[in-house]
């Protein structure tokens, strides 16, 4: 009997496991997600090193606006998963992970975002292998450790995703993505440099005076 196509991060396998198995050498991946975190990328780093191209579309521009806000909270948590659910050893290596992620994204990735909030709600992971064969999964999972089902124990989210098994549907999904990605009416914007700049803040050491003045600013600013 074939395994069910559901991936719920609970009893029917995880999206993270699907991606690890699906990514082949010189494959191209197209992703739609409201979030992107370095810890999720780090968990998939070995598989993702095989990719020749990575297109990431933020479905929710509120995330980009949040990382653009210059605050200490942004520096610490926006691109990291919830610190309460990430093991201390991973928190301690966050800077190194961010540095590696920036280098990889700089080489392999294109990053765009929807401009209009609350407009695109779906999540999609589409892979095109070097030989042209396609794989895809769609549903509710964001690109976070918990969204991909790569946390531990009770920290895993229960999601609802379906592996797309029909060739025609996989092709239609890629066409749908390409239409939004290449939109010229102001629906999307390029945010790669903005994302790389914010990620760099996670490993850039600031002088104590800078932290002090930033703290005073956020305490007393209107």
Image (tube, grey):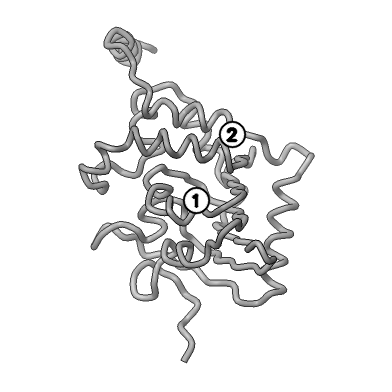
Residue 118 makes an appearance in the image: no
Mark 2 burial class by Cα count in 10 Å: few <14, some 14-19, many 20+: some
Q: Position of residue 43 (x, y in %)?
A: 37, 52
* Number of marks in picture: 2
Q: Out of 13 and 157, give the one closest to the viewer.
A: 13
Q: Is residue 86 above or below residue 70?
A: below
Q: Residue at position x 36%, y 27% from top?
A: 203
Give the image quarter of residue 98: top left
Q: Is residue 142 left or right of residue 106?
A: left
Q: Residue at position x 30%, y 57% from top?
A: 151
Q: Out of 116 and 167, give the one closest to the viewer.
A: 167
Q: Which secondary structure, mark 2?
A: helix
Look at mark 2 in the image and give the residue it sits on.
192
Q: Is residue 159 above or below residue 121?
A: below
Residue 22 makes an appearance in the image: yes
Look at mark 1 in the image and give the residue it sits on.
49
Residue farthest to the right, as pictured: 184
Which mark, by number, is residue 154? Answer: none
Q: Say which label, 2 or 1, has the lower sequence index.
A: 1
Q: Position of residue 91 (x, y in %)?
A: 26, 39
Residue farthest to the left, as pictured: 88
Q: Is residue 35 left or right of residue 169?
A: left
Q: Which secondary structure, mark 1?
A: loop
Q: Is residue 88 left or right of residue 25?
A: left
Q: Residue at position x 35%, y 58% from top?
A: 150
- Mark nearest the camera among 2 and 1 is 1
Q: Residue at position x 58%, y 46% from top?
A: 56
């Amino acid at each position: 009997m074939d395994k069910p196509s559901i991936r719920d991060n609970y009893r029917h396998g995880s999206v993270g496991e699907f991606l690890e198995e699906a990514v082949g050498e010189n494959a191209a991946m197209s992703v739609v997600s409201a979030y992107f975190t370095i810890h999720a990328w780090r968990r998939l780093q070995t598989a993702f090193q095989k990719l020749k191209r990575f297109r990431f579309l933020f479905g929710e521009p509120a995330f980009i606006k949040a990382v653009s806000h210059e605050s200490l909270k942004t520096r610490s948590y926006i691109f990291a998963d919830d610190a309460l659910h990430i093991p201390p050893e991973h928190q301690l290596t966050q800077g190194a992970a961010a540095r590696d992620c920036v280098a990889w994204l700089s080489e392999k990735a294109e990053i765009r975002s929807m401009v209009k909030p609350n407009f695109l709600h779906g999540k999609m992971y589409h892979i095109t292998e070097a030989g042209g064969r396609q794989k895809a999964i769609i549903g509710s999972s964001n690109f976070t450790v918990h969204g991909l089902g790569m946390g531990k124990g009770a920290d895993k989210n229960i999601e609802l995703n379906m592996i797309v098994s029909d060739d025609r549907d996989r092709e239609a999904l890629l066409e749908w993505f390409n239409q939004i990605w290449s939109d010229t009416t102001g629906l999307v914007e390029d945010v790669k440099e903005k994302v790389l700049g914010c990620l760099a803040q996670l490993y850039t050491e600031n002088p104590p005076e800078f932290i002090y003045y930033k703290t005073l600013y956020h305490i007393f600013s209107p």
